[in-house]
Amino acid sequence: MDDDVLDAGAACRVPARDLNWRFTTSGGPGGQHANRSHTAVELTIDLGTASGISDEVRPRLLERLGPVLRVFVDDTRSQHRNRQIALERAEKALRDARHRPKSRRATKPSRASSRRRVEAKRRRSQTKRDRRRPGADD
């Protein structure tokens, strides 16, 4: 991942000019540093207008992620590290969204596997039957 490009594959390379950064103070407890430093990072990418996304991939991204990808990170006390984490998460989201899952082909079990399954059930049933306490007719 370059500093000037968010690279989520060949058909999805978003340049830095299309990444919108916003920095805020992290919430929660903290001392002098935590409440004053703008270390929390929000990265937004307008997927409808971002350049570097091919026309084949853009509809899939819009369908799965919506018109705007928003990543908020306040994991660490370092703004620089939070920016890196935000870029990694955005890249992963884009990679996952552009991935086309393989279609499932319906299959049926073979005759031999069905026989083995039924035979195993029969053996198990017999084992349990043998463990029972003898009845009045035995």
Image (spheres, grey):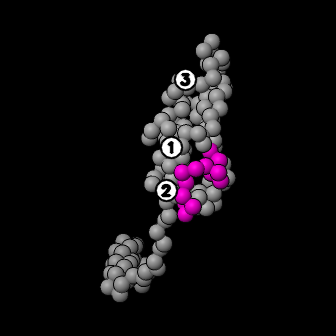
**Marks 1 and 2, how far apart in space?**
11 Å
Q: Secondary structure at mark 2?
A: loop
Residue 46 visible to the viewer: yes
Q: Which numbered marker is on residue 77?
A: 3
Q: Nearer the viewer, residue 14 or 138?
A: 14
| Up-down relation of residue 85 to residue 39 (above or below) | below
Range drawn in magenta = 45-57
Q: Looking at numbered disc 3 in the image, what kind of residue is underneath it?
A: Arg
Q: Looking at numbered disc 1 in the image, what kind of residue is underneath it?
A: Leu
Q: Looking at numbered disc 2 in the image, what kind of residue is underneath it?
A: Ala
Q: Residue at x 47, y 46 (%)?
A: 7
**Looking at the picture, how far across and down is residue 14, in whole percent?**
54, 46
**Marks 3 and 2, how far apart in space?**
34 Å
**Looking at the picture, how far across and down is residue 97, in whole percent?**
54, 56
The mark that comes first in sequence, 3 or 2, is 2
Q: Quadrant of the N terminus?
A: top left
Which quadrant of the figure has residue 38?
top right
| Up-down relation of residue 39 to residue 130 (above or below) | above
Q: Are marks 3 and 2 in contact (CB under 8 Å)?
A: no
Q: Residues within 10 Å of mark 3 (few under 14, many from 20)?
A: some
Task: Tell me the residue that label 2 is attached to.
Answer: 11
Task: Tell me the residue that label 1 is attached to.
Answer: 6
| Residue 115 left/right relative to 50 | left
Q: Residue at x 42, y 82 (%)?
A: 108
**Looking at the picture, how far across and down is residue 65, in whole percent?**
62, 54
Q: Is 118 within the magenta?
A: no
| Residue 30 left/right relative to 117 | right
Q: Secondary structure at mark 1?
A: strand
The mark that comes first in sequence, 1 or 3, is 1
Q: Residues within 10 Å of mark 1 (few under 14, many from 20)?
A: many
Q: Residue at x 50, y 38 (%)?
A: 4
Q: Secondary structure at mark 3?
A: loop
